[in-house]
Amino acid sequence: MHQAVSAYLNIAGIEAGYTYFAPNIPDNYKIVFELHYADGRTELELPMVKSHAAGLRLGALLDEMAELEYEPLRAMMVKMLAYSVWQEHPEASRIRAVLGYVDLPTPAEFRLGHRESYHVLFAYDFDFGATPQPSRP
């Protein structure tokens, strides 16, 4: 009986009581893409989402990536996000993905004029080549 209940809790994703009653509130992680062009231009791009739900999923994904201890998996996940950005900007010669967190001031610090600060955790450089290949259905 114990194994059946344990299996149910794990499959349902409710093995921890708090997650059953409340959604995962992600930390203040942020990813920024630096697009580098052959003519020397550099642009900054943030991930684009089409819905509020997708934004919550992206926040949870960034939370997972920042806490991940297996570096090759994190690098692959960041590369997949960078590739989707590169598909929107195929003329970019290189993309640097910078993953970090935003440190928000306390209310007392905010009243004193302190603002949020960004702390870099990881940075990855990717070169996808000249033009993206179309996907096949």
Image (cartoon, helix red, strand yellow):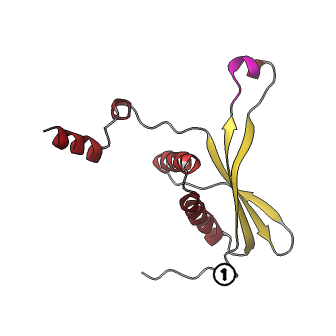
Q: Which residue is mark 1?
A: 131
Residue extending farthest to the right is 40
State the residue at coordinates (33%, 34%). Answer: 20
Q: Is residue 107 magenta?
A: yes
Q: Quadrant of residue 98?
A: bottom right
The residue closer to the viewer here, 118 or 132, is 118
Q: Residue at x 79, y 26 (%)?
A: 114
Residue 32: x and y in percent read 69, 53
Q: Residue at x 64, y 47 (%)?
A: 30
Q: Is residue 85 left or right of residue 44?
A: left
Residue at 66% from the left image edge and 81% from the top image edge:
131
Disc 1 element: loop
Q: Name the quadrant of the N terminus.
A: top left
Q: Quadrant of the image for the C terminus? A: bottom left
Q: Which residues are magenta?
A: 104-109
Location of residue 78 (image quadrant): bottom right
Q: Quadrant of residue 134?
A: bottom right
Establish if 38 lies above or below 60: below
Residue 77 is covered by the magenta coloring? no
